[in-house]
Image (cartoon, rainbow, N blue to C red):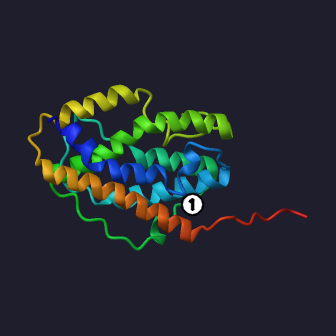
Amino acid sequence: MPLLDVLRHHTRRQHEALHQHPLLIGLSNPITLADFHRIVLAFDAYYTHAEAACLADWPDYAPNAPVLTWLASDRAQQGLESWSDRFDFHYAPLDTPSKLAGYLYTKQGSTLGGHVISKHLERQLALIPHLDQWFFAGYHDNGAQWKQFVATLETLGLDEAEVVTAAQQSFENICYFCDAMTLLMPWPIEIAHEA
């Protein structure tokens, strides 16, 4: 069975749990700008920790989405400071190509769903892709980047079990940061109004 199919099968539960997470539900339903801010801050914190854990080499020719750059653009556009240092979290080192591949499967795969979410954000909040929002908009060619990533997966001779475990852990780590953000920034946010 191709590694991509194995990954889809063995991460389905974790992936579907994220779609139902209270913090992320607005990505496919009505959403407020305050909700969007919470989501950006949660992903920024998650990816700050995850990217710091990436210790293995990855081929230069293979896609590796610049998520921290995209999130920094979102934060700057929205006037948000990073909350990554508010999370006491130890991300297990991604110190083999197989562990890194499992993490990148979740990261690269998110660009496909992100494309749909980006259109939703444009409809709901008038946030124009690559102008007002970057993280969910992703690449200008998300589909092509994904195909190149999948092709790379099948050529590297990776340890299947290690890839799957790292991918499952990545989804679960995203959930942790979403849970933590909900506790750090509970609903509703009080907004100060000028008199």
The image shows residue 60, relative to residue 190, as above or below, that is above
Residue 166 visible from this viewpoint: yes
Residue at x-position 28% and y-position 60%:
53
In the image, taking residue 112 as reference, residue 3 lies left or right, namely left
Question: Which residue lies under the disc numbered 1?
Answer: 81
Residue furthest to the left:
157
* Quadrant in which residue 29 is drawn: top right
x then y, percent, for residue 16: 40, 49
Residue at x-position 31% and y-position 59%:
52
Residue at x-position 60% and y-position 39%:
121
**Crowdedness of circle 1 by 10 Å Cα count: few (<14), some, many (20+)?**
few
Q: Quadrant of the C terminus?
A: bottom right
Total tally of numbered discs in the picture? 1
x then y, percent, for residue 123: 65, 34
Q: Please name whichever residue, 176 or 87, is drawn nearer the observer in this view of the structure.
A: 176
x then y, percent, for residue 32: 67, 50
* Quadrant in which residue 138 is drawn: top left
The image shows residue 177, relative to residue 68, as above or below, that is below
Residue 51 visible from this viewpoint: no
x then y, percent, for residue 125: 67, 41
Residue furthest to the right:
195
Q: Could you tell me the amino acid type at mark 1?
A: Glu
Q: Quadrant of the N terminus?
A: top left
Q: Please name whichever residue, 69 or 46, is drawn nearer the observer in this view of the structure.
A: 46
Residue at x-position 29% and y-position 59%:
169
The image shows residue 164, relative to residue 150, as above or below, that is below
Q: Please name whichever residue, 41 or 17, is drawn nearer the observer in this view of the structure.
A: 17
Secondary structure of the residue carrying numbered label 1? loop
In the image, taking residue 194 as reference, residue 102 lies left or right, namely left
